[in-house]
Image (cartoon, rainbow, N blue to C red):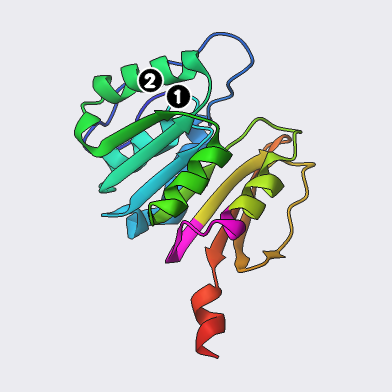
Amino acid sequence: MRIITGSARGAKLKAPKGQNTRPTADRIKESLFNILGAFVYDKNVLDMFSGTGNLALEALSRGASHATMVDMALESISIIKFNTAHTKLNDKATILKSDIFMAIKKFHQNKMKFDIIFCDPPYHKELCMKSLQILHEYPVLSDDGIIIMEHALEDILPDKYEEFSLLRRQKYGSTTQISIYENTKMVKSEE
C-alpha cells in the first residue's frame, strides 16, 4: 500500500496486522482517483472509518486542502498518525479517535462541511446505509459534494437516498464495489 501520485508519491503506508482493517487496494484506489481527477484539488475531505488514512492521504497528496480522518480503534489512530507524519501531510490533517456517527453530529453542530466524504466501513454490517442515513440527518456534505462508498459486492445500496443520487457504480473483482453519490439538495431547492 502506497501513495500513488502527488506530493507524497511512492510513500509506503503502514497497515495494522490482522483482518480488522481492510485497506483499499492500490488498484482500486488508483481507479477511484482516476475517476475523481482534478475534482480533488483544494477540497475538504472527510475519511469515515479511516483505518490507515489511505484514501484521505492520497487525496491530500493530490492537492486536497484538508482531510479529517476518523476512526475509533486505537491501533488505527496510531497507524494514521504514523502514515500522516511519514507522508509529511500533518499540516493538512486532523485525526480524531471517535465513533464516526458521534463525530458527524459534532461536525454538524460546528457547521463543518466536506466536499468529499470517503466511507469505507467494515463489510457486511450495513454501515454504508447507516452512514447515508446519518449524513442525511446531519448534513455535513457541501452542496456540490460527493460521497464515495466502498462496500461488498453483495451489499445493495440504493440509486437514490433522500438528497443523495448515484453518480456512478464501479465493480472491482468479485468482492468490492464503489458507489459514488452526489448531493442533489441544491437542485431540488431551485426547482
Kindly identify the amino acid type of the residue bearing the numbered disc 2.
Leu
Indicate which disc residue 52 carries. 1
Residue at image point 60% right, 59% down: 136
Horizontal side, residue 89 vs residue 33: left or right:
left
130 falls in the magenta region: no
Of the 4 image quadrants, the one containing the C terminus is: bottom right
User: Which residue is the site of mark 2?
Assistant: 13
Magenta residues?
135-146
| Drawn side of residue 97 relative to residue 155, left or right | left
Is residue 19 visible to the viewer in this orientation of the structure? Answer: yes
- Which numbered dot is residue 6? none
Q: Earlier in the sequence, mark 2 or mark 1?
A: 2
Q: Is residue 127 above or below residue 117?
A: above
Q: Position of residue 22 (x, y in %)?
A: 59, 24
Front residue of 140 and 176: 140
Q: Are marks 2 and 1 in contact (CB under 8 Å)?
A: yes
Give the Cα distance between marks 2 and 1: 8 Å
* Image coords of residue 50 (percent x, y): 48, 31
Residue 35 locus on image (x, y percent): 46, 54
Q: Verify whether residue 138 appears in magenta.
A: yes
